[in-house]
Amino acid sequence: MAPAPAPTPASELCNGVFLSYTFILGRKIPPNDTTDQPYRFESVLTVLNNGREELKEWRVFVGFRHREILISATDALIVNGTELPALVGNGTILGGSPVSDLKTAIQTAGDLKQMRAVIKLVGTQFMVTPPAIPMPSNISLVNDGWLCPEPTLQSKRELTTCCKRDPSIEVNTTITDKFLPRQPGDLTIMYDVIRAYDQNYLVEVKMENHNPLGRLDHWELSFDWKRDEFIQKMQGAYPTVVDATKCIFGPQSKIYTGLDFADVLTCERRPVIVDLPPTKAEDPNLGKIPSCCRNGTILPRIMDPSKSASVFLMQVSKMPPDFNRSALFPPQNWRIKGTLNPDYSCEPPVRVSPTFYPDPSGMPTKKSSFASWQIVCNITQVKTEIPKCCVSYSAFFNDSIIPCNTCACGCVSETRRTCSAESSPLLIPPDALLLPFENRTSLTVAWTALKHKTVPNPLPCGDNCGVSINWHMASDYRGGWTVRITIFNWGEIDFPDWFLAVQMKKPALLGFEKAYSFNASLLSVDGGVNNTIFMEGLPGLDYLVAEVDGLDPKKKVRVPGKQQSVIQFSKKLTPGIRVAESDGFPAKVIFNGEECLLPEVFPITSGGRRNGFIRVLLYVAVFVTAIIFGD
């Protein structure tokens, strides 16, 4: 009797994109811990294109669920730019690198090398003891327009699924367009190769801000070279470390035997690039690049479209086997950050259609780049860092200020603390608002005693924020109400062209009329309509200076930079608004793109007195005069 034919492999039954996750082996690794034992795992992720169209920039979600730490992934990287090793216990999305497109069998006559990606994964997982196998909960293709059914266990070690095109999306031809369309994002980076030679190329890097509430100050851009490249020259920006040591003692010196590496800018595998100061804008060697040399400031387009982008040039030297003009590979793992700005997560570079530029000869034609990649960066919704600014509340009907939260922007380690990081902040008198936290102690303790409150021991820690905003309810009358906003800069960095955005409950925003010392308007963000008050300084008030020493050395009190304005609201469209309660206070405050931490409580009326805080304007003037001129 003839043996039964072997079952057809699941991959051959799939007429779309076949995905499989195969567990190879696992073993116990030190330390020995019966309550939280770590294990090494090795597995293989396979992506196979059995469909009729080329799969560009494949992206696969792997639903890790055992607190995995991914140590290595061959020919792939984490799409959000996280470097390995990385915590992936809540799942992660992997993408191909350097090859990210999978051709079809029709295009390649069935060449699996061009149709398939095989990713070897190595990592650590916890508490799944052999013979149990730590399989993911799900695998799926996350490229737009694809649908994946729930994966099936082919065995204890293999999980598979077959993803197919969404039938509602038409596919025009078997051989699809050469490039993917450019994608929107909060910040996009273009990597345009404008000159190509056998051993090097010239690239223009352009960063553009598309988020109305996003910005960068003193931006720092970093990325990873994957093929031993190095930066020979730059214009419009500069590396933070100028050092060719790694080339001299690396493989580059064996290839470039006639090169004077003293002229090379940097051989860092992960260089950090910064903008140049305005004084270098006309420098023929370092500057002379449009949209460069602004100390790393990239503004929202609503403030100034001409300052919403930053550009620089790099001459990149390549290494074998890439010594031909067409061998062009962008760096990976892009990161961009600012001094007091939101956190960005950047996706891997995606090959897009060439960028067109005006012809430098002045002819009415356009010149294209040799090759272009787009990097899309978005502001992260889940904060990976502590806040950098905070908000305090006050009101005309209460003579105490609710200060920023304890450790709002972090605290020193417990071993070095002499204060309590867990205690709620103490109410402070109006004049303490103008003092650095370290100079408020005596006033705060005296105020607490005056209010018959217990003075805790130890005292609560400060907020440790570089920028704080005081939201003061200044008045509430039958026809309207007013708020006074004061911005304090306690840091060492000036903020030119600052902006402040405030989101409130809808009834309050319906009554917004104007700001007196700021340029203010209603802005629609996050899908809402006129849901944000956007404020920037008027000419002469658009520069928030850093904290400085007072002119009287005996006082030893530093003076913060500050800007202040009154905002006026009407009750014509909101007759039932309860201003003295939460309706008159913000739901979100954003300074220069960074969301600030709000207090957890609101001011309350104090014994029916409605005028106890009107004098805070006088305190500001009197205190500043005393600091500047002394007693």
Image (tube, rainbow, N blue to C red):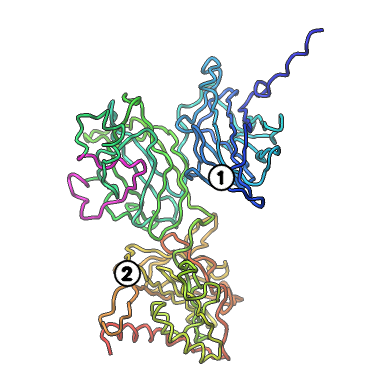
Q: From the viewer's side, name the closer residue of 150 and 204.
A: 150
**249 versus 412 height, above or below:** above
Q: From the viewer's side, name the closer residue of 157 and 506.
A: 157
Circle on res. 331: none
Q: Quadrant of the N terminus?
A: top right
Image-based side of 262 in relation to 49, left or right: left
- Earlier sequence position, callout 1 versus callout 2: 1
Q: How many labels were placed on the picture?
A: 2
The stretch drawn in magenta includes residue 278:
yes
- State the predominant SS element of the stretch in magenta: loop
Task: Pinpoint residue 119: horizontal percent, then vertical percent.
Answer: 54, 31
The residue wearing badge 1 is 69
**425 versus 357 height, above or below:** below
The amino acid at mark 1 is Ile
Q: Write down the quadrant of residue 561 in the picture.
A: bottom left
Extent of the magenta region: 262-286
